[in-house]
Image (spheres, rainbow, N blue to C red):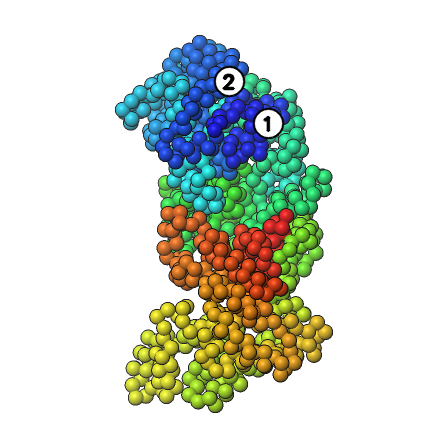
Amino acid sequence: PKYVYDFTEGNKDLKDLLGGKGANLAEMTNLGLPVPPGFTITTEACRHYLGDGGMPDGLGEEISAHLAELEAQMGKRLGDPGDPLLVSVRSGAKFSMPGMMETVLNIGLNDSSVLALAKQSGNERFAWDSYRRLIQMFGKTVLGIDGEFFETAIDELKDGRKDTDLDAADLQRLVETYKDIIRSETGRDFPCDPREQMELAIRAVFDSWNAPRAVLYRRQERIPGDLGTAVNVCSMVFGNLGMDSGTGVAFTRDPGSGQQGVYGDYLQNAQGEDVVAGIRNTVPLQELEKIDSEAYRELLDIMARLEGHYRDLCDIEFTIERGKLWMLQTRVGKRTAAAAFCIATQLVDEGLIGMDEAVKRVTGDQLAQLMFPRFAEATDNRRLTKGMNASPGAAVGKAVFTSEKAVELAGRGEAVILVRRETNPDDLAGMIAARGVLTSRGGKTSHAAVVARGMGKTCVCGAEELEVDVRAGRFTAPGGVTVEEGDVISIDGSSGAVYLGEVPVVASPVVEYFEGRPADEELVRSVDRIMTHADSVRRLAVRANADTPEDAARARRFGAQGVGLCRTEHMFLGDRRQLVEDLILAATPKECQAALDALEPLQTADFTGLFEAMEGLPVTIRLIDPPLHEFLPDITELSVKVALAGDEATDRDRRLLEAVKRLHEQNPMLGLRGVRLGLVIPGLFEMQVRAIAKAARASEARQSAGAKAEIMIPLVGAVQELEIVREAAEGILAEAGVSALIGTMIEVPRAALTAGQVAEAAEFFSFGTNDLTQMTWGFSRDDVESGFFGKYLDLGVFGVSPFESLDRDGVGRLMRIAAEEGRRTRPGLKLGICGEHGGDPDSVHFCHEIGLDYVSCSPFRIPVARLEAARAAL
Ligand code: PEP
Ligand code: MG
């Protein structure tokens, strides 16, 4: 295979092979934009290298050939002692992983070429600064030396002075110190052969794919671990040649709101990493107009071209070298959830994309984020300061100052806000653990801001009035207010405000819109347009898991087209528990009947409420499911109570204890539940079916829409179970003159594997993927997620809990079999899902793929499911 592509050979659609950065550099090169020449080593070479630890055969020759071409084009040779070409070696994976992997700049410098660089640039200081940066980056990333060594050395040299106060002689001395560090830490000299520098840097970039922070980031972002990274070798341009040079980052629109305009940061006399790291404070991009109006205008032109070309918001990195503009990177930019919706409809209005594409440009996860609450407007909590609104949301928690502390407290279930001067990739674990991130340095493109936005985590950055003292574990706000570790603060990622104490939060405008408020702001209008279009293109219907009329009514406002699961056991809790106890304690058929008679009118009223709330839409009522012991007192407590009471113990308590002992099971989730319960306790299911029939009649009498009942039998493993219940139910329905579908849940693997038979007795299947996942994997759904799943995720057994996102290969395979074989028996068989997965984006796509008719999920996930069902259909 071909492992190396010149920038002129690639294009933006080759991200799998060239990584995002490489593909887009190629695209820009071919658009004729000013990109410093270079080439990209493919992800395939990386996979080969990481797979068996060796560079692929022929890669070295290919690199040499491309390097020779680059040298010819630039009229210089890499590291030439007379006139050196310098290159950067940068990572670039398919999915952007900001700051997670390595970069080495200024490759090609050594003791002789540094002198040539000084002469060429007429700037000795610059040359020695570039050289010391190379040794520092190389030492840290390629040779694995602790960065502290270099930082301490430079701090000692500065001795209180600023970076810019160091002159050429200082930096030359620093180079010697750095070389000593390398010698003493690795036992070898800094390699002065330019080609060797390049070779080692390429390996280091490959290796950085598996750096712990990169692994953690991928897990968080659900990026597959086996993609590998590409490596971009690019001729260096310098933003640190003087005040007529500089570097910056920009967005073609505001990544926070979607507004068009000029958004970005610029830093004079600096190299790229300085901006992203938030080391010095940048100026707003608008100021470039005053600094260098020609470069500014060219930049705006290029940004407009890029947006038109990509038909989306782009972010870019650029450098100005002595007045000449160079494009170093572009990509379709990350944005907040709100901006994603606004931009999608703006682009429709600008004629760049159609509504189908607009629906594809937003995600269910983004919609879910917009449904988070935000802070109440007026608050008498003390506002400490205002920083930049880097990533929206409202976060409240205890201030912590280190990543470790954040992880520790969050592990104990506490809400924390990670407070730092600036973050770097080592803070990732703390950022994941925290509810929000607050920094005192850095702009909207700083590491903290970019990573937080990507995670959908609330972030306020660049709150410069705060004096953050990480070592002492406190920060000081204007007016001398001091916040210590553990003090509660509230941060508003939408406004940038930081408050002392806990600020009350209010509902999101998107939720209010779903609740029926008119769409009167841009975001809500965008959501409305996108959801309306989504509803017109999706094939899957969306239903709600709802047990009460209130839940059902809310679900309808959110767009539910029916109830897919009413868990009737939820109706047996609270005051009614006593009645269930009576049923369990019943010693004679007469007592049993009396207990059922007491429950029936209550159930009838429950169902009537649901039918009326749904006004003729289908309502799937599941007959009672959970293990009976859940309704009975705890066996230990009751034993103690009876033992203590001795002869005084009541007759009821004694009988109860007997029943509890009789019904005690080692594995209740595999025990007497679902259809088994219905077959064992005479009259229980019949009572429920009678209540459904009566409720249906009552609603028909009261409202014209009537009721559309679907009776669902849980935990069926064999068609025989279903047949027995079905026969009894049909008798009751016929007697009442009510028609209802009768179907089953598919929760037991055996039901899926014998679906062809089960479908003989079922008019519909609803996949209960909570139990189906539990029984397919043999994982207890109540225990594992707080137990060994953390380890399993670390070990990569799966990338996400199978209870959260459907395991397509295992559980999904059973579903596919059941769907196909069920429909072979009964072509019109209605298919749905009502496990938690019904509201998970990836699982919704799977349900679409295997031809289900609907997904059912909790009311708050319904908009997400509607949107994802549409995206699956497009
Ligand atoms: C399921 O098992 O997926 C289901 C919906 O039923 P429950 O969660 O009530 O067991
Ligand atoms: Mg279940």
Q: Is residue 647 left or right of residue 133?
A: left
List x then y, in percent, for residue 84: 45, 14
The image shows a total of numbered marks equal to 2
Q: Examine the rendering and report whether any part of residue 8 can be seen.
A: yes
- Residue 71 vs residue 85, the one in the foreground: 71
Residue bearing mark 1: 28
Above or below 130: residue 119: above
Mark 1 belongs to which amino acid?
Answer: Met
Q: Residue at x 39, y 60 (%)?
A: 778
In the image, which is nearer the foreground, mark 1 or mark 2?
A: 2
Residue bearing mark 2: 70
Mark 2 belongs to which amino acid?
Answer: Leu
Q: Residue at x 33, y 30 (%)?
A: 145
List x then y, in percent, for residue 712: 55, 70
- Residue 442 vs residue 739, the one in the foreground: 739
Q: Residue at x 58, y 58 (%)?
A: 852
Secondary structure category for the residue under label 2: helix
Secondary structure category for the residue under label 1: helix
List x then y, in percent, for residue 324: 58, 19
- Residue 195 vs residue 479, the one in the foreground: 195
Which quadrant of the figure has residue 565? bottom right
Q: Is residue 639 left or right of residue 455?
A: left
- Residue 46 vs residue 852, the one in the foreground: 852
